[in-house]
Amino acid sequence: MMKLKNLFPNFDLATMIVKNWDYDSLDLFKYWRISSNAIYPFKNQEKVHFLRIAPVDEKSEEAILGELEFLRYLRDKSYTAILAKPSKNGKELEIVNTPWGKYYAVVFERVKGEALEDTQITNDIALLWGKALGRLHKLSQAYIPIGQKRCSWKDQIDWVKKVLNDFPDEKKAYREAKILEEFFQSLPITDENYGLIHYDFELDNVFYDEETNEISPIDFDDSMYHWYAMDIEQTIDSIKSEISPVRAEEVAEKFLEGYRSEYNISDDMISLFPVFRRFADLYGYTRLLLSTQEKWGNEPEWLDKLRIKLSDIMNKRKSKFGRLVE
């Protein structure tokens, strides 16, 4: 999540930046959303596109370029991932100076279908979902970046420790980072079990098109080099969190079955799911800690409520920090 001060919509800013691309109508701007990026939908040639923007102090140019290169690779391999649209200047990434500061901007064309969070997930769809992640990892195994390389789990742990150094009271979180760092350094890395993962292959970032019977993931913004099992754990955790308990176990089983039909995951790696969950909790905790650091007087009611919600999430995660890996 971006810093809370950046969660307010700015239509003048978005209108100024989107002029770097062709568009027919900006009426869809009213359906904006902001989390890790600010997203403003618009139409061009009757197709829905999404302007994704973020202040330069929130993101890394190298990371975005690495994300876009990986997406081009996937499309070249006929994988139905989201597609970035070049600007009028022929650039997929625009760096724009504005009265509100400098921003990174990318435009994506909407993928077909509906997000899985808005879909009745049958066993067949769950199988396709798993197969899509398995194929993604199979393609990742063969991927050799030409330009910028995405960061790794180690880079993110280093970033976590750097952030926590500015929060002297976060001793448990820092200890958790050290425990996980030591454990992951002991894990074997092979071409088969480790590579560039999506990291957020969850219900809101995966679309299903009934007409073509295809799965299309979006939002590779958090992709990193990690063990492939991290992606699987993240997805299964989202299934258990967001799908009714009556269906969650079966959906998770079908997802894993679909994955294994495309790519192998050993039982040893599956047994490490709890450790990968700890990585996700620590990484997410630190991002929220940084996002909520600043506070202002007379904050709107919705922001007060958001702070309470985020605080509850952080406290639950923090309560589990510092345990030795069994």
Image (cartoon, grey):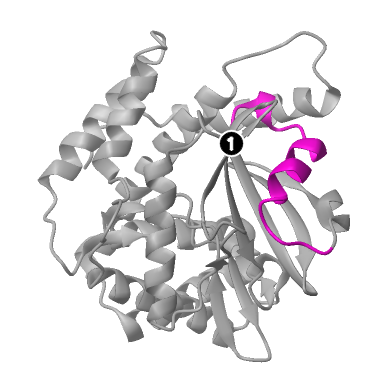
Q: Residue at x 28, y 51 (%)?
A: 149
Residue 218, relative to residue 168: is it above or below? below
Viewed as shown, does residue 257 lie left or right of 247?
A: left
Asked if residue 215 lies left or right of residue 296, the reply is left
Q: Quadrant of residue 228?
A: bottom left
Query: Which residue lies under the disc numbered 1?
Result: 103
Can residue 64 be seen from the camera position used here?
yes
Q: Position of residue 120 (x, y in %)?
A: 70, 77
177 in magenta: no
Amino acid residing under circle 1: Tyr
- Quadrant of the frame with the C terminus: top left
Name the image quarter holding the N terminus. top right
For the point 33% across and 29% down, the residue is: 159
Front position in the image: 248 or 78: 78
Position in image of residue 89 (x %, y %): 56, 56
Query: Range of the magenta residues?
Result: 1-24
Near mark 1 (Cα within 10 A), the count class, few <14, some 14-19 or many ≥20, is: many
Image location of residue 186, percent across then percent down: 11, 45
Q: Is 183 placed above or below 314 here?
A: below
| Between 182 and 113, the one nearer to me in the picture | 113
Location of residue 239 with respect to 97 vertically, above or below: below
Quarter occupied by residue 239: bottom right
Residue 19 painted magenta: yes
Instruction: Specify the farthest residue to the front.
Output: 89
Left/right placement of residue 287 relative to residue 306 reads: left
**Is 98 above or below relative to 187?**
above
Confirm whether residue 1 shows in the render.
Answer: no
